[in-house]
Image (cartoon, rainbow, N blue to C red):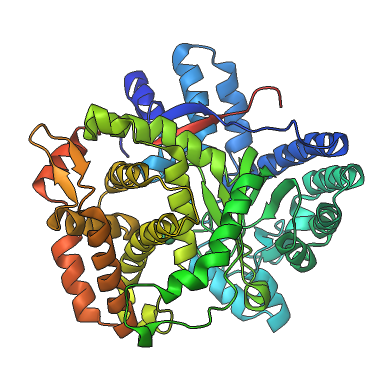
Amino acid sequence: MAAVPDLAELNRMIARFAPAELKVDTSKLSPGDKQALAKLIEAAQVIDKIFWEQRWSGNARLRAQLEKDISAHGKDRLHYFDLNKGPWSDLDGQTAFLENVPAKKLPGANFYPEDMNKDEFETWAAKLPPAQQEQARGFFTVIRRKPWREGLPTRPRNGEDLEFVPYSVEYKTDLTRAAALLNEAAALTGNASLKTFLTLRAKAFLTGDYYDSDVAWMKLDAPIDITIGPYETYNDELFGYKAAFEAYVTLRDDAETAKMKNFADHIQEIENNLPLDAKYKNPKLGALAPIRVVNEVLATGDGAHGVRTAAFNLPNDERIVKAMGSKRVMLKNVQEAKFSKILQPIAARVLAPADQNNLSFDAFFTHILAHEMTHGIGPQNNVRQSLKELHAAIEEAKADVTGLFMLQYLFDHHLLAANEKALYTTFLASSFRTLRFGVHEAHGRGMALQFNYLSGKGAFVAKPDGTFAVDSSKIKNAVRDLVHDLLEVEATGDYARAKKMLDELGVIRPPLEKALDKLKDLPVDIEPVRPSGI
Ligand code: ZN
Protein backbone atom coordinates (compact mmCIF):
# COMPACT_ATOMS: atom_id res chain seq x y z
CA MET A 1 0.00 0.00 0.00
CA ALA A 2 1.34 3.44 -0.92
CA ALA A 3 2.17 5.73 2.00
CA VAL A 4 -0.61 8.12 2.96
CA PRO A 5 0.19 11.79 2.25
CA ASP A 6 1.90 13.94 4.88
CA LEU A 7 0.62 17.40 5.78
CA ALA A 8 2.46 19.18 2.93
CA GLU A 9 1.27 16.67 0.35
CA LEU A 10 -2.29 16.82 1.67
CA ASN A 11 -2.25 20.61 1.35
CA ARG A 12 -1.07 20.29 -2.24
CA MET A 13 -3.94 17.89 -2.91
CA ILE A 14 -6.48 20.26 -1.35
CA ALA A 15 -5.09 23.23 -3.31
CA ARG A 16 -6.21 21.53 -6.55
CA PHE A 17 -9.72 22.72 -5.62
CA ALA A 18 -10.16 26.49 -5.67
CA PRO A 19 -12.87 27.72 -3.26
CA ALA A 20 -15.55 29.59 -5.22
CA GLU A 21 -18.81 31.16 -4.13
CA LEU A 22 -21.68 30.19 -6.42
CA LYS A 23 -23.66 33.24 -7.48
CA VAL A 24 -27.41 32.87 -7.33
CA ASP A 25 -30.24 35.38 -7.15
CA THR A 26 -33.23 34.39 -5.01
CA SER A 27 -34.75 37.88 -4.90
CA LYS A 28 -37.29 37.17 -7.65
CA LEU A 29 -38.76 34.11 -5.95
CA SER A 30 -42.28 34.42 -4.57
CA PRO A 31 -42.58 34.33 -0.76
CA GLY A 32 -44.01 30.80 -0.98
CA ASP A 33 -41.15 29.62 -3.18
CA LYS A 34 -38.62 31.15 -0.76
CA GLN A 35 -40.06 29.05 2.06
CA ALA A 36 -40.21 26.00 -0.21
CA LEU A 37 -36.55 26.53 -1.10
CA ALA A 38 -35.54 26.29 2.57
CA LYS A 39 -37.40 22.97 2.87
CA LEU A 40 -35.74 21.63 -0.28
CA ILE A 41 -32.27 22.58 0.99
CA GLU A 42 -33.05 20.61 4.14
CA ALA A 43 -34.27 17.64 2.08
CA ALA A 44 -31.06 17.77 0.00
CA GLN A 45 -29.04 17.52 3.22
CA VAL A 46 -30.94 14.40 4.25
CA ILE A 47 -30.15 12.91 0.82
CA ASP A 48 -26.48 13.76 1.39
CA LYS A 49 -26.48 11.68 4.57
CA ILE A 50 -27.83 8.66 2.66
CA PHE A 51 -25.08 8.99 0.06
CA TRP A 52 -22.34 9.01 2.71
CA GLU A 53 -23.73 5.72 3.95
CA GLN A 54 -24.01 4.29 0.42
CA ARG A 55 -20.41 5.14 -0.41
CA TRP A 56 -18.86 3.33 2.55
CA SER A 57 -20.18 1.71 5.71
CA GLY A 58 -17.29 3.20 7.72
CA ASN A 59 -17.91 6.84 6.73
CA ALA A 60 -20.04 8.01 9.68
CA ARG A 61 -17.75 6.49 12.31
CA LEU A 62 -14.57 7.80 10.66
CA ARG A 63 -15.95 11.28 10.18
CA ALA A 64 -16.94 11.52 13.87
CA GLN A 65 -13.38 10.50 14.75
CA LEU A 66 -11.80 13.06 12.37
CA GLU A 67 -13.96 15.84 13.79
CA LYS A 68 -12.33 15.37 17.19
CA ASP A 69 -8.81 16.08 15.89
CA ILE A 70 -8.47 19.88 16.00
CA SER A 71 -4.77 20.00 14.99
CA ALA A 72 -3.89 21.63 11.63
CA HIS A 73 -3.32 18.22 10.06
CA GLY A 74 -6.59 16.97 11.56
CA LYS A 75 -8.55 19.88 10.10
CA ASP A 76 -7.02 19.31 6.66
CA ARG A 77 -7.86 15.64 6.81
CA LEU A 78 -11.49 16.45 7.63
CA HIS A 79 -11.58 19.08 4.87
CA TYR A 80 -10.32 16.65 2.25
CA PHE A 81 -12.53 13.87 3.62
CA ASP A 82 -15.57 16.13 3.09
CA LEU A 83 -14.40 17.13 -0.39
CA ASN A 84 -14.27 13.46 -1.39
CA LYS A 85 -17.12 12.21 0.82
CA GLY A 86 -14.90 9.48 2.16
CA PRO A 87 -11.24 8.51 2.73
CA TRP A 88 -10.38 8.01 -0.98
CA SER A 89 -9.18 10.77 -3.28
CA ASP A 90 -11.37 11.15 -6.39
CA LEU A 91 -8.60 12.86 -8.38
CA ASP A 92 -6.08 10.12 -7.59
CA GLY A 93 -7.92 7.03 -8.76
CA GLN A 94 -9.90 6.65 -5.52
CA THR A 95 -6.82 5.82 -3.46
CA ALA A 96 -6.75 6.25 0.32
CA PHE A 97 -5.34 9.42 1.86
CA LEU A 98 -5.95 8.22 5.42
CA GLU A 99 -4.55 5.31 7.43
CA ASN A 100 -6.44 2.21 8.50
CA VAL A 101 -8.98 2.25 5.68
CA PRO A 102 -9.15 0.06 2.54
CA ALA A 103 -6.39 1.16 0.11
CA LYS A 104 -8.98 1.94 -2.58
CA LYS A 105 -12.69 2.63 -2.66
CA LEU A 106 -14.54 -0.69 -2.47
CA PRO A 107 -15.86 -1.63 -5.94
CA GLY A 108 -19.29 -2.51 -4.58
CA ALA A 109 -19.36 0.55 -2.27
CA ASN A 110 -21.92 -0.21 0.46
CA PHE A 111 -24.47 -1.61 -1.99
CA TYR A 112 -23.28 -5.19 -1.41
CA PRO A 113 -21.74 -7.05 1.51
CA GLU A 114 -18.01 -6.19 1.58
CA ASP A 115 -17.04 -9.86 1.44
CA MET A 116 -19.32 -10.73 -1.51
CA ASN A 117 -17.78 -11.21 -4.96
CA LYS A 118 -19.37 -11.18 -8.42
CA ASP A 119 -19.57 -14.97 -8.68
CA GLU A 120 -21.41 -15.31 -5.42
CA PHE A 121 -23.95 -12.71 -6.53
CA GLU A 122 -24.45 -14.36 -9.93
CA THR A 123 -24.86 -17.84 -8.43
CA TRP A 124 -27.47 -16.52 -6.03
CA ALA A 125 -29.32 -14.26 -8.49
CA ALA A 126 -29.54 -17.00 -11.14
CA LYS A 127 -31.62 -19.15 -8.78
CA LEU A 128 -34.22 -16.44 -8.07
CA PRO A 129 -37.58 -16.25 -9.87
CA PRO A 130 -37.45 -13.68 -12.74
CA ALA A 131 -39.30 -10.89 -10.91
CA GLN A 132 -37.00 -11.18 -7.92
CA GLN A 133 -33.94 -11.38 -10.15
CA GLU A 134 -34.95 -8.07 -11.64
CA GLN A 135 -35.16 -6.60 -8.13
CA ALA A 136 -31.78 -8.02 -7.15
CA ARG A 137 -30.21 -6.36 -10.20
CA GLY A 138 -32.39 -3.25 -9.91
CA PHE A 139 -31.39 0.38 -9.33
CA PHE A 140 -33.15 0.69 -5.99
CA THR A 141 -32.17 -2.26 -3.80
CA VAL A 142 -29.09 -3.09 -1.72
CA ILE A 143 -27.81 -6.61 -1.23
CA ARG A 144 -27.31 -7.73 2.35
CA ARG A 145 -26.54 -10.93 4.24
CA LYS A 146 -29.33 -12.26 6.41
CA PRO A 147 -28.44 -12.51 10.08
CA TRP A 148 -26.68 -15.86 10.60
CA ARG A 149 -28.96 -18.64 11.69
CA GLU A 150 -28.81 -22.40 12.12
CA GLY A 151 -28.29 -24.22 8.86
CA LEU A 152 -26.50 -21.41 6.99
CA PRO A 153 -22.87 -22.09 6.12
CA THR A 154 -20.24 -19.69 7.44
CA ARG A 155 -17.72 -20.21 4.61
CA PRO A 156 -17.48 -20.67 1.69
CA ARG A 157 -20.66 -18.80 0.93
CA ASN A 158 -22.59 -19.42 -2.23
CA GLY A 159 -25.19 -16.78 -1.79
CA GLU A 160 -27.37 -18.89 0.53
CA ASP A 161 -27.64 -16.00 2.98
CA LEU A 162 -27.95 -13.10 0.51
CA GLU A 163 -31.12 -11.05 0.20
CA PHE A 164 -32.12 -7.81 -1.50
CA VAL A 165 -33.49 -4.95 0.57
CA PRO A 166 -35.38 -2.08 -1.14
CA TYR A 167 -33.99 1.42 -0.58
CA SER A 168 -37.37 2.35 0.91
CA VAL A 169 -36.61 -0.14 3.70
CA GLU A 170 -32.80 0.21 4.00
CA TYR A 171 -32.96 4.03 4.25
CA LYS A 172 -36.46 4.24 5.68
CA THR A 173 -35.79 6.79 8.44
CA ASP A 174 -34.00 9.27 6.16
CA LEU A 175 -36.34 8.79 3.19
CA THR A 176 -39.39 9.33 5.41
CA ARG A 177 -37.85 12.59 6.62
CA ALA A 178 -36.94 13.67 3.06
CA ALA A 179 -40.45 12.80 1.81
CA ALA A 180 -42.02 14.90 4.57
CA LEU A 181 -39.85 17.87 3.58
CA LEU A 182 -40.78 17.50 -0.10
CA ASN A 183 -44.47 17.42 0.84
CA GLU A 184 -44.04 20.54 2.98
CA ALA A 185 -42.31 22.30 0.07
CA ALA A 186 -45.10 21.16 -2.29
CA ALA A 187 -47.66 22.81 -0.01
CA LEU A 188 -45.67 26.08 -0.04
CA THR A 189 -44.96 26.56 -3.76
CA GLY A 190 -47.54 28.06 -6.11
CA ASN A 191 -46.08 26.33 -9.17
CA ALA A 192 -48.21 23.39 -10.32
CA SER A 193 -45.46 21.40 -12.08
CA LEU A 194 -43.17 21.68 -9.04
CA LYS A 195 -46.00 20.70 -6.72
CA THR A 196 -46.69 17.60 -8.83
CA PHE A 197 -43.06 16.54 -9.00
CA LEU A 198 -42.44 16.98 -5.27
CA THR A 199 -45.59 15.11 -4.27
CA LEU A 200 -44.83 12.20 -6.60
CA ARG A 201 -41.17 12.07 -5.63
CA ALA A 202 -42.09 12.01 -1.92
CA LYS A 203 -44.33 9.05 -2.66
CA ALA A 204 -41.54 7.33 -4.62
CA PHE A 205 -39.16 7.63 -1.65
CA LEU A 206 -41.62 5.56 0.38
CA THR A 207 -42.69 3.04 -2.28
CA GLY A 208 -39.50 2.65 -4.32
CA ASP A 209 -41.41 3.18 -7.59
CA TYR A 210 -39.85 6.20 -9.29
CA TYR A 211 -41.52 6.07 -12.71
CA ASP A 212 -44.32 8.63 -12.30
CA SER A 213 -42.05 11.09 -10.52
CA ASP A 214 -39.39 10.76 -13.27
CA VAL A 215 -42.07 11.62 -15.83
CA ALA A 216 -43.10 14.63 -13.69
CA TRP A 217 -39.43 15.68 -13.51
CA MET A 218 -39.24 15.73 -17.34
CA LYS A 219 -42.22 18.12 -17.33
CA LEU A 220 -40.96 20.31 -14.47
CA ASP A 221 -40.99 23.98 -15.48
CA ALA A 222 -40.71 26.22 -12.45
CA PRO A 223 -38.58 29.01 -10.97
CA ILE A 224 -37.23 26.41 -8.51
CA ASP A 225 -35.82 23.45 -10.40
CA ILE A 226 -34.86 20.41 -8.37
CA THR A 227 -33.34 17.02 -9.09
CA ILE A 228 -33.45 14.73 -6.09
CA GLY A 229 -33.27 10.98 -5.69
CA PRO A 230 -31.23 7.89 -6.54
CA TYR A 231 -29.73 8.34 -10.03
CA GLU A 232 -26.24 7.47 -11.28
CA THR A 233 -24.71 4.03 -10.92
CA TYR A 234 -20.97 4.84 -11.18
CA ASN A 235 -20.37 4.09 -7.50
CA ASP A 236 -21.35 0.48 -8.14
CA GLU A 237 -18.14 -0.62 -9.84
CA LEU A 238 -19.06 -4.29 -9.38
CA PHE A 239 -22.10 -4.32 -11.67
CA GLY A 240 -23.21 -0.74 -12.30
CA TYR A 241 -26.71 -1.63 -11.04
CA LYS A 242 -27.19 0.46 -7.93
CA ALA A 243 -28.17 4.12 -7.98
CA ALA A 244 -26.52 6.62 -5.65
CA PHE A 245 -28.54 9.39 -4.00
CA GLU A 246 -27.92 12.98 -5.00
CA ALA A 247 -29.70 16.32 -5.09
CA TYR A 248 -29.37 19.53 -7.08
CA VAL A 249 -31.41 22.39 -5.69
CA THR A 250 -31.33 25.04 -8.41
CA LEU A 251 -33.11 28.09 -9.81
CA ARG A 252 -34.12 28.36 -13.47
CA ASP A 253 -32.10 30.92 -15.46
CA ASP A 254 -34.67 32.78 -17.55
CA ALA A 255 -32.23 34.78 -19.71
CA GLU A 256 -30.33 31.67 -20.82
CA THR A 257 -33.56 29.77 -21.30
CA ALA A 258 -34.63 32.50 -23.75
CA LYS A 259 -31.26 32.18 -25.51
CA MET A 260 -31.83 28.43 -25.88
CA LYS A 261 -35.22 29.08 -27.40
CA ASN A 262 -33.63 31.42 -29.93
CA PHE A 263 -31.14 28.65 -30.84
CA ALA A 264 -33.90 26.05 -31.11
CA ASP A 265 -35.92 28.37 -33.36
CA HIS A 266 -33.01 28.52 -35.83
CA ILE A 267 -31.60 25.03 -35.58
CA GLN A 268 -33.21 23.79 -38.83
CA GLU A 269 -31.79 26.83 -40.61
CA ILE A 270 -28.32 25.97 -39.25
CA GLU A 271 -28.70 22.36 -40.44
CA ASN A 272 -29.74 23.58 -43.90
CA ASN A 273 -26.63 25.77 -44.09
CA LEU A 274 -24.04 23.30 -42.81
CA PRO A 275 -20.97 23.10 -45.06
CA LEU A 276 -21.87 19.60 -46.24
CA ASP A 277 -23.26 17.99 -49.38
CA ALA A 278 -27.05 18.47 -49.43
CA LYS A 279 -27.69 14.75 -49.73
CA TYR A 280 -26.39 14.24 -46.17
CA LYS A 281 -28.58 16.93 -44.61
CA ASN A 282 -31.78 16.35 -42.73
CA PRO A 283 -34.57 18.55 -44.21
CA LYS A 284 -36.77 17.89 -41.20
CA LEU A 285 -35.08 17.63 -37.83
CA GLY A 286 -37.07 15.89 -35.11
CA ALA A 287 -37.63 17.44 -31.71
CA LEU A 288 -34.32 18.04 -29.96
CA ALA A 289 -33.76 16.85 -26.41
CA PRO A 290 -34.75 19.59 -23.95
CA ILE A 291 -31.95 21.61 -22.34
CA ARG A 292 -32.51 23.47 -19.06
CA VAL A 293 -30.18 26.19 -17.79
CA VAL A 294 -30.20 26.61 -14.03
CA ASN A 295 -28.10 28.07 -11.21
CA GLU A 296 -27.09 25.82 -8.35
CA VAL A 297 -28.07 26.73 -4.81
CA LEU A 298 -26.88 23.45 -3.31
CA ALA A 299 -25.71 20.10 -4.63
CA THR A 300 -25.39 17.13 -2.30
CA GLY A 301 -24.67 13.42 -2.29
CA ASP A 302 -23.16 11.85 -5.38
CA GLY A 303 -23.49 15.20 -7.19
CA ALA A 304 -21.06 16.86 -4.81
CA HIS A 305 -17.69 15.18 -4.40
CA GLY A 306 -14.41 15.45 -6.29
CA VAL A 307 -14.73 17.20 -9.67
CA ARG A 308 -17.99 19.12 -9.57
CA THR A 309 -20.84 18.43 -11.94
CA ALA A 310 -21.46 21.26 -14.41
CA ALA A 311 -24.11 19.46 -16.51
CA PHE A 312 -26.04 16.22 -16.40
CA ASN A 313 -28.48 14.11 -18.46
CA LEU A 314 -31.34 12.35 -16.71
CA PRO A 315 -33.32 10.23 -16.09
CA ASN A 316 -31.58 6.89 -16.67
CA ASP A 317 -34.81 4.87 -16.78
CA GLU A 318 -34.83 3.41 -20.32
CA ARG A 319 -38.64 3.35 -20.45
CA ILE A 320 -38.78 7.13 -20.05
CA VAL A 321 -35.83 7.81 -22.36
CA LYS A 322 -37.63 5.79 -25.07
CA ALA A 323 -40.98 7.48 -24.56
CA MET A 324 -39.92 11.10 -24.00
CA GLY A 325 -36.11 11.33 -24.27
CA SER A 326 -33.93 12.68 -21.51
CA LYS A 327 -33.35 16.19 -20.26
CA ARG A 328 -29.98 17.94 -20.12
CA VAL A 329 -29.48 20.30 -17.20
CA MET A 330 -26.67 22.87 -17.34
CA LEU A 331 -25.48 24.44 -14.09
CA LYS A 332 -24.55 27.93 -15.25
CA ASN A 333 -23.09 29.34 -12.03
CA VAL A 334 -20.92 26.22 -11.60
CA GLN A 335 -19.57 26.82 -15.10
CA GLU A 336 -19.03 30.46 -14.17
CA ALA A 337 -17.05 29.48 -11.06
CA LYS A 338 -14.89 27.11 -13.11
CA PHE A 339 -14.39 29.87 -15.68
CA SER A 340 -13.13 32.41 -13.15
CA LYS A 341 -11.07 30.04 -10.98
CA ILE A 342 -9.56 27.85 -13.69
CA LEU A 343 -9.94 29.28 -17.17
CA GLN A 344 -8.90 32.83 -16.31
CA PRO A 345 -5.63 31.73 -14.62
CA ILE A 346 -4.92 29.48 -17.63
CA ALA A 347 -5.55 32.37 -20.02
CA ALA A 348 -3.17 34.55 -18.03
CA ARG A 349 -0.39 32.12 -18.96
CA VAL A 350 -1.25 31.14 -22.54
CA LEU A 351 -2.62 34.38 -24.02
CA ALA A 352 -0.84 37.68 -24.63
CA PRO A 353 -2.00 40.40 -22.16
CA ALA A 354 -4.01 42.27 -24.82
CA ASP A 355 -5.93 39.11 -25.76
CA GLN A 356 -6.89 38.41 -22.17
CA ASN A 357 -9.35 41.29 -22.42
CA ASN A 358 -11.27 39.24 -24.95
CA LEU A 359 -11.90 36.46 -22.49
CA SER A 360 -15.62 36.35 -21.77
CA PHE A 361 -17.80 34.10 -19.63
CA ASP A 362 -20.79 34.90 -21.80
CA ALA A 363 -18.91 33.68 -24.89
CA PHE A 364 -17.71 30.60 -22.99
CA PHE A 365 -21.17 29.62 -21.78
CA THR A 366 -22.94 30.46 -25.04
CA HIS A 367 -20.51 28.15 -26.81
CA ILE A 368 -21.22 25.35 -24.31
CA LEU A 369 -24.94 25.71 -25.10
CA ALA A 370 -24.21 25.71 -28.84
CA HIS A 371 -22.03 22.59 -28.38
CA GLU A 372 -24.91 20.77 -26.67
CA MET A 373 -27.40 21.77 -29.36
CA THR A 374 -25.17 20.81 -32.27
CA HIS A 375 -24.85 17.25 -30.94
CA GLY A 376 -28.42 17.04 -32.28
CA ILE A 377 -27.67 18.16 -35.86
CA GLY A 378 -25.51 16.81 -38.69
CA PRO A 379 -25.47 13.13 -39.73
CA GLN A 380 -27.06 10.88 -37.09
CA ASN A 381 -27.68 7.48 -38.72
CA ASN A 382 -25.31 4.62 -37.81
CA VAL A 383 -22.47 7.06 -37.14
CA ARG A 384 -21.68 5.48 -33.78
CA GLN A 385 -21.64 1.95 -35.19
CA SER A 386 -19.41 2.84 -38.16
CA LEU A 387 -16.85 4.93 -36.28
CA LYS A 388 -16.83 2.57 -33.27
CA GLU A 389 -14.29 3.58 -30.58
CA LEU A 390 -13.36 6.73 -32.56
CA HIS A 391 -16.91 8.03 -32.53
CA ALA A 392 -16.82 9.85 -29.18
CA ALA A 393 -13.71 11.93 -30.02
CA ILE A 394 -14.99 12.80 -33.52
CA GLU A 395 -18.47 13.67 -32.19
CA GLU A 396 -17.09 15.88 -29.40
CA ALA A 397 -14.84 17.73 -31.89
CA LYS A 398 -17.81 18.07 -34.24
CA ALA A 399 -20.00 19.58 -31.50
CA ASP A 400 -17.26 22.08 -30.59
CA VAL A 401 -16.56 23.39 -34.09
CA THR A 402 -20.13 23.12 -35.31
CA GLY A 403 -21.04 25.13 -32.20
CA LEU A 404 -18.59 27.83 -33.35
CA PHE A 405 -20.01 27.65 -36.87
CA MET A 406 -23.57 27.98 -35.56
CA LEU A 407 -22.75 31.07 -33.47
CA GLN A 408 -20.92 32.68 -36.38
CA TYR A 409 -23.98 32.04 -38.55
CA LEU A 410 -26.24 33.69 -35.97
CA PHE A 411 -23.81 36.66 -35.72
CA ASP A 412 -23.72 37.03 -39.51
CA HIS A 413 -27.50 36.99 -39.77
CA HIS A 414 -27.99 39.39 -36.84
CA LEU A 415 -29.82 36.74 -34.85
CA LEU A 416 -27.42 37.05 -31.91
CA ALA A 417 -25.33 39.99 -30.67
CA ALA A 418 -21.96 39.46 -32.35
CA ASN A 419 -18.77 39.15 -30.37
CA GLU A 420 -16.38 37.27 -32.62
CA LYS A 421 -13.12 38.16 -30.88
CA ALA A 422 -14.48 36.99 -27.53
CA LEU A 423 -15.87 33.78 -29.01
CA TYR A 424 -12.66 32.59 -30.68
CA THR A 425 -10.20 33.83 -28.05
CA THR A 426 -12.23 32.24 -25.25
CA PHE A 427 -12.43 29.02 -27.25
CA LEU A 428 -8.64 29.03 -27.70
CA ALA A 429 -8.05 29.50 -23.96
CA SER A 430 -10.62 26.87 -23.03
CA SER A 431 -8.92 24.32 -25.31
CA PHE A 432 -6.00 24.35 -22.85
CA ARG A 433 -8.39 23.62 -20.02
CA THR A 434 -9.52 20.44 -21.80
CA LEU A 435 -6.06 19.47 -23.06
CA ARG A 436 -4.56 19.60 -19.56
CA PHE A 437 -6.12 16.23 -18.87
CA GLY A 438 -4.42 14.61 -21.86
CA VAL A 439 -5.70 12.91 -25.00
CA HIS A 440 -6.71 9.63 -23.36
CA GLU A 441 -10.42 10.38 -23.36
CA ALA A 442 -12.77 11.65 -26.04
CA HIS A 443 -12.96 15.34 -25.10
CA GLY A 444 -9.17 15.74 -24.89
CA ARG A 445 -8.49 13.81 -28.07
CA GLY A 446 -11.21 15.69 -29.95
CA MET A 447 -9.80 18.97 -28.68
CA ALA A 448 -6.24 18.10 -29.77
CA LEU A 449 -7.62 17.32 -33.23
CA GLN A 450 -9.23 20.75 -33.42
CA PHE A 451 -6.23 22.56 -31.98
CA ASN A 452 -3.79 21.01 -34.48
CA TYR A 453 -6.16 21.38 -37.43
CA LEU A 454 -6.81 25.05 -36.72
CA SER A 455 -3.07 25.62 -36.09
CA GLY A 456 -2.28 23.90 -39.40
CA LYS A 457 -4.57 26.38 -41.16
CA GLY A 458 -2.83 29.27 -39.43
CA ALA A 459 -5.95 30.16 -37.41
CA PHE A 460 -4.26 29.44 -34.06
CA VAL A 461 -0.75 30.84 -33.89
CA ALA A 462 2.07 29.89 -31.45
CA LYS A 463 4.09 33.02 -30.61
CA PRO A 464 7.87 32.95 -29.88
CA ASP A 465 7.20 34.05 -26.28
CA GLY A 466 5.19 30.85 -25.65
CA THR A 467 1.73 32.44 -25.85
CA PHE A 468 -0.95 31.63 -28.42
CA ALA A 469 -3.30 33.82 -30.45
CA VAL A 470 -6.20 33.62 -32.90
CA ASP A 471 -5.65 34.91 -36.45
CA SER A 472 -9.04 36.53 -37.03
CA SER A 473 -8.49 36.65 -40.81
CA LYS A 474 -8.24 32.84 -40.94
CA ILE A 475 -10.36 31.40 -38.13
CA LYS A 476 -13.78 31.51 -39.82
CA ASN A 477 -12.71 29.62 -42.94
CA ALA A 478 -10.65 27.16 -40.91
CA VAL A 479 -13.66 26.38 -38.68
CA ARG A 480 -15.85 25.95 -41.74
CA ASP A 481 -13.35 23.53 -43.33
CA LEU A 482 -13.09 21.48 -40.16
CA VAL A 483 -16.89 21.33 -39.77
CA HIS A 484 -17.04 20.08 -43.36
CA ASP A 485 -14.38 17.40 -42.83
CA LEU A 486 -15.85 16.09 -39.58
CA LEU A 487 -19.44 16.03 -40.85
CA GLU A 488 -18.32 14.23 -43.99
CA VAL A 489 -16.49 11.61 -41.92
CA GLU A 490 -19.70 11.08 -39.94
CA ALA A 491 -21.98 11.10 -43.01
CA THR A 492 -19.88 8.49 -44.82
CA GLY A 493 -19.05 6.54 -41.64
CA ASP A 494 -15.48 6.47 -42.96
CA TYR A 495 -13.57 4.69 -40.16
CA ALA A 496 -10.19 4.79 -41.94
CA ARG A 497 -10.45 8.54 -42.52
CA ALA A 498 -11.47 9.13 -38.90
CA LYS A 499 -8.51 7.06 -37.73
CA LYS A 500 -6.08 8.93 -39.96
CA MET A 501 -7.37 12.29 -38.67
CA LEU A 502 -7.11 11.26 -35.03
CA ASP A 503 -3.71 9.59 -35.43
CA GLU A 504 -2.26 12.67 -37.09
CA LEU A 505 -4.06 15.41 -35.18
CA GLY A 506 -5.34 13.93 -31.92
CA VAL A 507 -1.90 14.29 -30.30
CA ILE A 508 0.00 16.81 -28.16
CA ARG A 509 2.80 18.45 -30.16
CA PRO A 510 5.89 20.17 -28.64
CA PRO A 511 4.73 23.85 -28.50
CA LEU A 512 1.48 22.74 -26.92
CA GLU A 513 3.24 20.42 -24.51
CA LYS A 514 5.48 23.28 -23.35
CA ALA A 515 2.43 25.48 -22.75
CA LEU A 516 0.65 22.71 -20.84
CA ASP A 517 3.72 22.21 -18.61
CA LYS A 518 3.33 25.79 -17.45
CA LEU A 519 -0.19 25.05 -16.16
CA LYS A 520 0.61 22.15 -13.84
CA ASP A 521 0.34 24.06 -10.55
CA LEU A 522 -3.03 25.67 -11.35
CA PRO A 523 -6.20 24.36 -9.67
CA VAL A 524 -8.07 21.68 -11.60
CA ASP A 525 -11.51 22.21 -10.12
CA ILE A 526 -13.55 24.25 -7.68
CA GLU A 527 -14.81 23.74 -4.16
CA PRO A 528 -18.21 25.45 -4.10
CA VAL A 529 -18.92 27.72 -1.17
CA ARG A 530 -22.63 28.09 -0.33
CA PRO A 531 -24.00 31.39 -1.68
CA SER A 532 -24.17 33.93 1.12
CA GLY A 533 -27.56 34.70 2.59
CA ILE A 534 -29.18 31.38 1.61
ZN1 ZN B 1 -20.41 17.04 -25.99
Q: Up-down: is 101 above or below 221?
A: above
Q: Viewer-proximal residue, 12 or 387?
A: 387
Residue 4: x %, y % from top left: 35, 30
Which image quadrant: the N terminus? Answer: top left
For this view, does 484 lie left or right of residue 45?
A: left
Q: Viewer-proximal residue, 121 or 373?
A: 373
Q: Which residue is pictured at 46% across the width and 21% down the height? A: 76
Q: Is any atom of residue 96 visible in this view?
A: yes
Quarter of the figure with residue 298: top right
Number of numbered markers:
0
Residue 514: x %, y % from top left: 13, 39
For this view, does 408 lie left or right of residue 200?
A: left
Quarter of the figure with residue 99: top left
Q: Which residue is pictured at 34% across the width and 42% down the height? A: 426
Q: Viewer-proximal residue, 73 or 311?
A: 311
Q: Viewer-proximal residue, 393 or 127?
A: 393
Residue 497: x %, y % from top left: 19, 77
Q: Up-down: is 77 above or below 33?
A: above
